[in-house]
Image: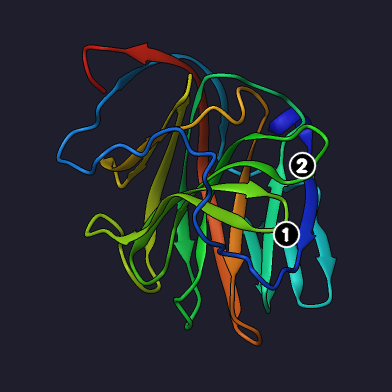
Amino acid sequence: MFEKALRFMVVSCLLLLAGACSAVEQVLAPGQSPAQGYRYLELLLEEDFADGGAWRNYAADELFLGVEDGAYKIDFTGRKYVWTQGDAHYTDVVVEADFEQNSDYDHNAFGLACRLDPANSGRGYTFLISGDGYASIRWSNGRSLKPIVAARPSARVNRGEASNRVRAVCVGDYLALWVNDEFVVEARDRRASAGAVGLVAVMNYAGQRLTVTIDDLKLWRAAPDDRGP
């Protein structure tokens, strides 16, 4: 369990999903196959959230993060970018989890993060899908999420109140998002080489609610593999 506990941070911003960022080194062209493969090495973490006592809960006005009914739950209302991260730090990893979106309003975003700042500033890479079927890879500066790969519709994402398996690949400068065991988007970026892994959620509309539960989280140390994924 992320060193037995998670830290919590919530930030409300006027520009949560911001415009393009010039620091991106390269965005790879979309296609049927990823440009780079990766290898799973040892399994570092496997969490089914059955033991809620090992996880900290956080509750405030219109915000809840924590274990409930055998899953990790993020539930909040309003314009917010919310993240929670572990204490351990990693370089090259693959992280995967099952997400269930339970909101009537599906113009939202949620997913995984890697290489988050150990100081808990929110800086790092985020791998997002939305209830209305979009996917993106973004850089978080802790106040806004700037696209590395801008949000684009994907047939791999199950829409509405549905479940999706999200996988984030962070190996060297290579970043990739897989959804339901299918490749979706990829990029290369060198702003962060190590950090924490975490869970993220975004609502960019005042008065709207996002509820998402996360289960069966797995984390592997990984390495590049030219033979394919």
Percent across and percent down for residue 179 are 33, 47
Q: How many marks?
A: 2
Percent across and percent down for residue 203 are 59, 71
Percent across and percent down for residue 10 are 77, 60
Q: What residue is shown with label 2? A: 6
Answer whether labels 2 and 1 touch (C-beta < 8 Å): yes
Q: Residues within 10 Å of mark 1 (few under 14, many from 20)?
A: many
Question: In this orientation, which residue lies closer to the viewer: 56 or 228?
Answer: 228
> Residue 192's quadrant in the figure?
top right
Q: Which mark is residue 65?
A: 1
> Quick check: 198 left or right of 41?
right
* Three-letter amino acid code of the residue under disc 2: Leu
User: Mark 2 or mark 1: which comes first in sequence?
Assistant: 2
* Three-letter amino acid code of the residue under disc 1: Leu
Looking at the image, which residue sits at the far left?
Answer: 32
Scheme by which the image is coloured = rainbow
Above or below residue 121? Residue 20 is below
Pick the quarter of the image with the N terminus: top right
Q: Residues within 10 Å of mark 2 (few under 14, many from 20)?
A: many
Q: Is residue 182 visible?
A: yes
> Quick check: 54 left or right of 101?
right
Looking at the image, which residue sits at the far bottom?
Answer: 207
Question: In this orientation, which residue lies closer to the viewer: 145 or 154?
Answer: 145
Percent across and percent down for residue 40 are 40, 17
Above or below residue 21? Residue 101 is below
